[in-house]
Amino acid sequence: RLLELASLLAGARMVRLNARHYCSILQACQGRVKEEPELLETALEVYATMIRTGVPADRSTYNVLISLCDKAGQLDRALAVHEDMQRAGVKPDIITFNTLISACKSLGEPDRA
């Protein structure tokens, strides 16, 4: 449903979504992604839609995506999102690093932190 909503809103000419809108859509996945890890795929599709429609992701968006990857048990994906963040020229903050460290620890790979 979230992907449908994002696509519908992005396609509507009356509404121009910005990074905050997309981040809010992604945050809606956070409470359920542990029980429904497939929501990570939906979140990543929302992110892809965001980029495809020319909306640059901001630090908050990347932080939410990293957190979603952690909660879904996907450390490699969390690290890949961090790499995307760096390629986009978005500077990580303490939340970014704490989330990455937490992901490494909770997913059993503290040496990667």
Image (cartoon, rainbow, N blue to C red):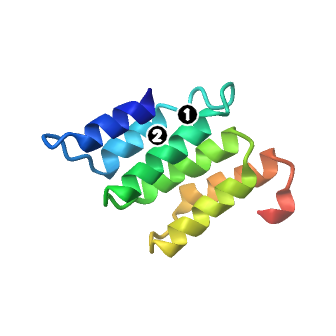
Tag 1: amino acid = Gln
Residue at figure coordinates x 35%, y 61% from the top left? 56
In which quadrant is the N terminus drawn? Answer: top left
Horizontal placement of 42 versus 75: left or right?
Answer: left
Neighbourhood count class around disc 1 (C-alpha, 10 Å): few under 14, some 14–19, many 20 upward: many
SS of the residue at dot 1?
Answer: loop
Circle 2 residue:
26
* Residue 30, image quadrant: top right
Query: Marks 1 and 2, Cα distance to the nearest angstrom?
Result: 7 Å
Mark 1–mark 2 CB contact (< 8 Å): yes
Residue at figure coordinates x 59%, y 33% from the top left? 39
Q: What mark, if any, has residue 14 been given in the picture?
A: none
SS of the residue at dot 2?
Answer: helix
Circle 1 residue:
30
Residue at figure coordinates x 79%, y 45% from the top left? 106
Tag 2: amino acid = Leu
